Image (cartoon, rainbow, N blue to C red):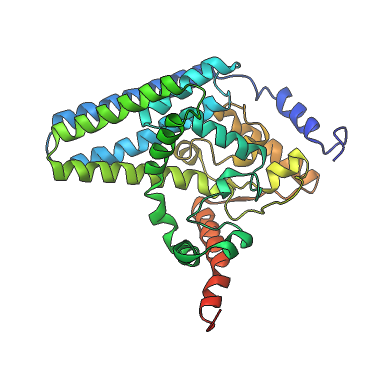
Amino acid sequence: MNDSAPGSYRHLLSEVREAGLLRRRRGYYAVVITANLMVFAGAWVAFAFLGDTWWQLLIAAVLAVVFAQLAFVGHDAGHKQIFRTRRPNDAVGVVHGGLVGMSYQWWIDGHNRHHANPNHEDHDPDLDIPALAFTRGQARLKQGFLRWMAKNQAFLFFPLLTLEGLNLHVSGIRAVWRGETKMRRVEGALLTAHIAAYLTVVFLVLSPGLAVAFVVVHQALWGVYMGCSFAPNHKGMPTMTGRPVDFLQRQVLTSRNIRGGRMVDFVLGGLNYQIEHHLFPSMPRPHLRRAQPIVERFCLRHDIPYAQTGLLRSYRHVLEHLHHLGAPLRAADRVPGA
């Protein structure tokens, strides 16, 4: 698409900038960060007061939500939504990564590669998940146990999300250990402090069996929350191969918005405006809601498909897509000798 054409990204960017939607909202983030930290601290205070009781599993659920909200702030910092320059954003991101026990630098590196090539079969790391098949080509290449998983991936999807929290911890530790992050020493110290403090407090206050249950519930719910926040945004949308199309269409055609009010905005950390977020990654979270009708009208005027659906329907899209990709494998296994 010609950059000077009426339907070009430059024209949309100009419209959004004129609406003041790219200006920073440091006051908003100050309130969000303060509120998150207060709830985080309050949950651990409540944990200490409750002592060795099964009611602690409620605290585990609360902490799962808090961990996700802290991770959302880290995500926004990674896109320079809070400050204009990289250094203060990275400081916020690294600290928030340490609070939830993951490597901010490792995660944002992969996430930026995803933004550059969303749903590209060769270049999007979010499509490179061994346990799942997101394209026909990936499904055909599955062998052994991974083939069985691909056949049944629609049924396994949500159970697998319970392991996402563990995956974030392990992947971050591995990246730091291998020196694959820009702030290896700082992140290594934060991850070590997180793991040591977390396990010490849990096993000091709770009996061994309850401590294990607390960790399992907390990490599983956090993993499900994170997976349910990110998966609806692209899974089941068109994938791309070869040379990518222009930036505007690449971001819009591969993304899906989730309808809903301010509660959905809060629960999904603004990721429900995925199209707007991909078009303007540095746009502060509270402005995405105002940018949405501008982008939708622009796409309508220029015949660019704009995908938007409800929250529950989005999960149905994801599961239907995964089930559809597993169908040829299930059919082949019913044919003798296939």
* Marker count (numbered): 0
For image coordinates 54% across by 82% down, the residue present is 337
Give the percent coordinates (x, y) of residue 307. Answer: 65, 50
For image coordinates 80% across by 44% down, the residue present is 301
Asked if 76 appears above or below 245 in the picture, the reply is: above
Q: In which quarter of the image is residue 223?
A: top left
For image coordinates 50% across by 53% down, the residue present is 130
Give the percent coordinates (x, y) of residue 185. Answer: 42, 20
Closer to the camera, 151 or 286? 151
Give the percent coordinates (x, y) of residue 165. Answer: 38, 42
Q: Can residue 36 be seen in this view?
A: no
Give the percent coordinates (x, y) of residue 270. Answer: 53, 36
For image coordinates 15% across by 45% down, the residue present is 209
Asked if 321 appears above or below 1 in the picture, the reply is: below
Q: Quadrant of residue 15?
A: top right
Q: Quadrant of residue 115?
A: top right
Q: Could you tell whether 14 is left or right of 5 in the image? A: left
Q: Which image quarter is the C terminus in?
A: bottom right
Pick out the residue farthest to the front.
Answer: 178
Q: Which image quarter is the N terminus in?
A: top right
Closer to the camera, 7 or 324? 324
Closer to the camera, 6 or 80? 80
Q: Can residue 181 be seen in this view?
A: yes
